[in-house]
Image (spheres, rainbow, N blue to C red):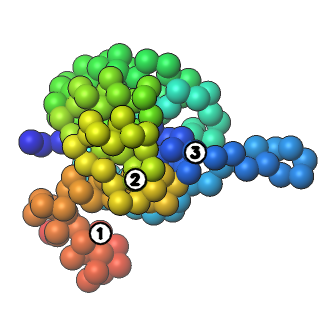
Amino acid sequence: MEIKLVLSDVDGVWTDGGFYFTEEGEMMKKISVYDGWGVRYCRNLGIPVGIITAEESAMAVRAAEKFKTPYIYSGVKEKLPAAQKLCEELGITLQETAYIGDDLNDLPLLLAVGYSGCPANANKWVRERVDYVCTTKGGDGAFREFVESLLQHTTEFADLVTSYATYGVYKPQ
């Protein structure tokens, strides 16, 4: 199975699902830098990454910008139709798509894609239905682990890791 698009939820995957509040009452969320490496791996291998999140979230948009994620869908209540539309625009199928999510609202999309995953602390019903359950919790690099699980058996990923180890940056062979 060749994956041509990787999609992700944000809350509970890139974040720990919690809210943090400053003394002034401003809400913040923590995103792991490790997940940025997952996006970088995909970008270096020519696989676009997209975010589909149910929450109207400026934070998700900022994270997508920071990690140079080309597709961001915020405030999406039904994720499957959004993913279908993006796949149609890209000329690919859902079977050529991977998705990681953590909760019940992610299930329709998780069950429709070619490769699905969730963080270790995802909802029980989600963990029972995905292809890959991360050992990492959401907010601690689960997206990166999911991407590595997807790509680890490919020659391209082995070359990418070797290139980083040799040069410190990706140098296509």
* Figure quadrant of the N terminus: top left
Q: Residues within 10 Å of mark 1 (few under 14, many from 20)?
A: some
Q: Secondary structure at mark 2?
A: loop
First in sequence, mark 1 or 3: give its number.
3
**What residue sits 25% from the left and 20% below the top?**
88
At 36% from the left and 35% from the top, the residue drawn is 125
Do the residues under discs 3 and 2 have CB atoms within 8 angstroms?
Answer: no
Residue 18 visible in rendering: yes
Tag 3 residue: 17
Q: Cβ–Cβ below 8 Å for labels 1 and 3? A: no
Residue 92 in view of the camera:
no
For the residues labelled 1 and 2, say whether their Cβ atoms are less than 8 Å apart.
Answer: no
Residue 73: x %, y % from top left: 48, 28
Q: Position of residue 24 (x, y in %)?
A: 90, 47
Which numbered disc covers residue 120? 2
Disc 2 crowd rating (10 Å Cα; few below 14, some 14-19, many 20+) is some
| Local SS, label 3 | loop
What residue type is disc 3 on? Gly
Identify the residue at horizontal 17%, vertical 69% (top origin). 159
Out of 83 and 162, give the one closest to the viewer: 83
Looking at this rendering, what residue extends furthest in the right direction?
24
Picture layout, residue 141 above or below residue 77: below
Residue 170 - label: 1
Question: Sequence-wise, which precedes: disc 3 or disc 2?
Answer: 3
> Real-space Cα distance between discs 1 and 3?
32 Å
Q: How far is mark 3 from mark 2, CA to CA?
A: 13 Å
Does residue 89 sit above or below 168 in this rendering? above
Nearest to the eye among marks 3 and 2: give it. Answer: 2
Instruction: Say whether residue 39 is left or right of residue 160.
Output: right
